[in-house]
Amino acid sequence: MFGTNRTVKDIQDFLLVCFSSIIRRASNADNESQKTYVSHTKVKRPEEVYSLFFPQLEYFIERIAWFSQTIKPELKAQIVCNTSPASLKDSLVEESMDLAITSPPYIKAIDYIYNQMVELFWIGDIFQLQTQANQNSKKKEYIGTKHVHKTEFEHYTPYETSVGIYKLDKKLKHIFDTDRKNGHKHSFVTFRYFMEMDNHFAQMAKCLTRGTPYVMVVGDSSVSNTYFDTADFLIQLAERNGFKCKNKWGYKIKNRYMRFDRKGRGGIIETDWVLDLVRK
């Protein structure tokens, strides 16, 4: 319908973004639940599609026009869609970067695909996520995912395998010892998160030249009622992989896009931290 012209394809993508932003509000699915279901105790009257879509379209047009007028036209940006940090350098081959920006997932906090399942029922085929099997497979690729099989951590113990950061390893042992129900799994999930981020920094160091800024936005997390200074631990991992932290500041999260009530599981993430790193 839209053809392969790049300009037309950009318009198609823009319209899809607008459409995806109204799907839940225009559906019968409950607005405040992670589960994709029709509530019989809290009856919902879906909002009318056209009255949602066209105001949203106008709002997005204003924002993209402002953005286009603000940035320098000679600047180029690339979004790297790659879940494997090991092949990151291959994705960026022959690319010259003046700035890199990213925001890794929280530890065990949000099941992004599960939370967006209503939207995926409509547009999931664009990302090959139209089936439950494809969605479950994708979940396993996320850094920080809690979707791990018992065979993956049955031989893990924080007393034999460590990250190499004393305070962090101590917290992993605490979870392992005190959470009788899920401590083994949660300690492993958290350990693997930091080791995968350690590998990420190692790969990014190969992609960036000396003096290149690398900005990361990340929130601290709680796992098994144990608080993790995630931002501080990531700074230590970054610095041991060739980066220097020039600055760190935080802002209170006021508008939570992932608005679903998780009943306190994983803790409420109050602050996002901005890490201003530079390749040494």
Image (spheres, rainbow, N blue to C red):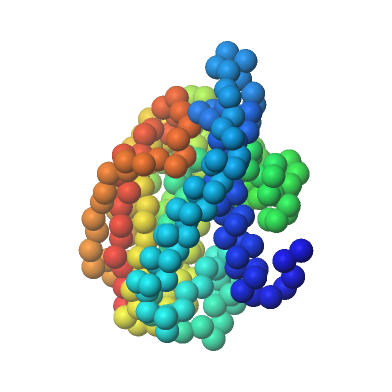
Q: Quadrant of the N terminus?
A: bottom right
Count all numbered tags in the image, as a single digit: 0
Give the residue at x 44% y 42%. 257
Q: Please, is residue 92 above or below residue 248 in the view?
A: below
Residue 132 x/y as whole percent: 73, 41
Is 211 situated left or right of 205 in this image?
left
Give the residue at x 32% y 49%. 272
Q: Please, is residue 18 above or below residue 102 in the view?
A: above
Is 277 situated left or right of 25 in this image?
left
Viewer-closest of 139 and 225: 139
Viewer-closest of 28 and 117: 28
Give the residue at x 52% y 24%. 181
Q: Quadrant of residue 24?
A: top right
Q: Quadrant of residue 74?
A: bottom left
Residue 237 appears in view: no
Q: Please, is residue 246 above or below residue 122 in the view?
A: below
Viewer-closest of 33 and 57: 57
Q: Quadrant of the C terminus?
A: bottom left
Residue 111 x/y as whole percent: 55, 40
Q: Quadrant of residue 107?
A: top left
Residue 2 appears in view: yes
Give the residue at x 61% y 20%. 39
Residue 100 x/y as whole percent: 41, 71
Residue 276 x/y as whole percent: 29, 65
